[in-house]
Amino acid sequence: MKEEYDALIQNNTWNLVELPKGKKAISCKWVYVVKKDLQSDPKYKARLVARGFSQIDGIDYNETYSPVVGRSVIRFLLALTVELNLKMYSLDICTAFLNGELEEEIYMTQPEGFTVEGLENKVCLLNKALYGLKQASRTWNTTITKELVTLGYEVSVNEPCMFYRKMDDSFTVLALYVDDFLIVTNDISEKERLVKKLGSKFRLKDLGETKYLLGMRIRKRNGSIYVDQEEYICKILEKFAMINCKNVSTPLPAGCKLDRNNSDKLSEIFSYQSLVGCLNYLALIARPDIAFAASFLGQYNSCATAEHWKCAKHVLRYLRKTKDLCLVYSKTGKSIVGYSDSDYANGEDRKSYSGNIFELANGPISWEAKKQKSVALSTTESEYIALSEACKEGVFLRKMLMELLNDDSPILMNVDNQSCIKLASNPVFHSRCKHIDVRYHYVREVVQNGLIDLEYVPTEIMKADIMTKSLPKVKHEYLLDALGMKPFDCIN
């Protein structure tokens, strides 16, 4: 607490003043945590947090939104590191939010245990954004963005938390997730310059080459990068008392069907919702193989029964067996390749499932498993809707390549339905598809403009099939291998 208080005072976080008439001071509290740094011993930390829930909109704050870099962008940069033989480093800004300059006039009570003797009736007029304030994250993001632009970095048009600097042969990209920095570069001197300049403005820790990022463990071997979440999976297994459970080979039983039975709800439905939330986090970060299972089970968050709970635990049994499974990025010299698929009318409400996967450096960088919003009337229509959703992500990734590498080549999209390809390539089936929502015809525009190239692949080797349904063991393991997902110890 003393260290935190001293840091606040040194940072000129507030001035002690009399509370003006008509003004109300928000309160604050101390928050304690044992921070388990994956690279060192646990640390005891205390943080002074403002009770921002008492702030009044329009008086104490206006805008609160603050962006963070997308997870697919992080994986895109990991793959790019392999393809371009770049180096990857991490930085951490200490007490990042305290560096944001407040525009609003906010008063706060003095922190408990540190009231200044003789000035007990005075309050803190905040100069800097304190943790807990509703606008703190936005204020910090604005501050660091201005600083990076001053240092010669450009803000990405497509990703507001990605910055890049290209000069002659020097190439550096920086991704920002609140106070965590990922630096990808081929120029060590530029990285050192960046650290020195930022260090003159903010207290920071240079963590060296990236080993852990956003819950991912990142390892290198023979020029390839391996990403896993084994530690987080072990925590989930412990939390739900499944650390010694029996293993299974697939996330869900093949052809798994569930329905809504509101008369037999779980008494402790919060546990089910908590587990589904954990599975969703895993599926978003580094486990595309459970993306369908997490999405499927999430449909029953408000009406889960014992049968749903059993299926959710089935996913945990699968994770116990595959906890060391890695995303693997290896140099190929090829550009991004996408796969789009759907499972027609397989849900209880007869809505189809869309799935897509995009690969770079021979590993998945973006994926999605999602139930379609409307009922498709044919397999062609369901595939067309899935392809339209996939093309949005494909165009975004293409823009990233264009911005960073000046690569304007189209994204190759693999589809396992010939009629869907024909429908997307030319509007000859008007009489049979005029009912399809206009927004799904976006795929025609991007194909005709040369942004996306479509190619047919047989269903047997469609990688996105793993995102649309629960598969038998043999097919599931085949697709895992096709996606390059393997345990680290099994990789040569």
Image (cartoon, rainbow, N blue to C red):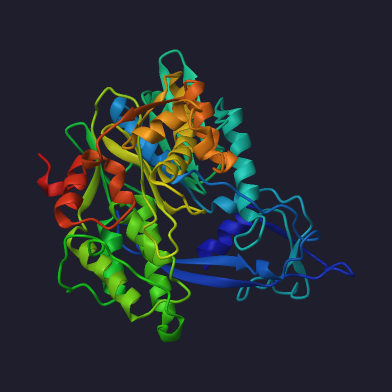
Residue found 45% across the figure and 77% down from its top: 303
User: Left of 403 or right of it: where is 59?
Assistant: right
Residue found 38% across the figure and 23% down from its top: 187
Quadrant position of residue 152: top right
Q: Position of residue 103 (x, y in %)?
A: 76, 50
Reply above or below: 439 against 287: above
Residue found 51% across the figure and 46% down from its top: 203
Reply above or below: 161 against 30: above
The extreme top residue here reads 168
The answer to whether one can see residue 323 in this image is: yes
Residue found 43% across the figure and 53% down from its top: 370
User: Left of 95 or right of it: where is 256?
Assistant: left
All told, the count of numbered labels is 0
The answer to whether one can see residue 44 in this image is: no
User: 184 or 206: nearer the eye?
Assistant: 184
Q: Position of residue 35 (x, y in %)?
A: 39, 64
User: Left of 237 or right of it: where is 265?
Assistant: right
Quadrant position of residue 274: bottom left
Reply above or below: 186 against 225: above
Quadrant position of residue 439: top right
The extreme front residue here reads 431
User: 219 or 99: nearer the eye?
Assistant: 219
In what quadrant of the picture does the C terminus appear?
top left
Q: Position of residue 398 (x, y in %)?
A: 45, 28
User: 119 or 96: nearer the eye?
Assistant: 96
Reply above or below: 81 against 12: above
Q: Position of residue 232 (x, y in %)?
A: 31, 61
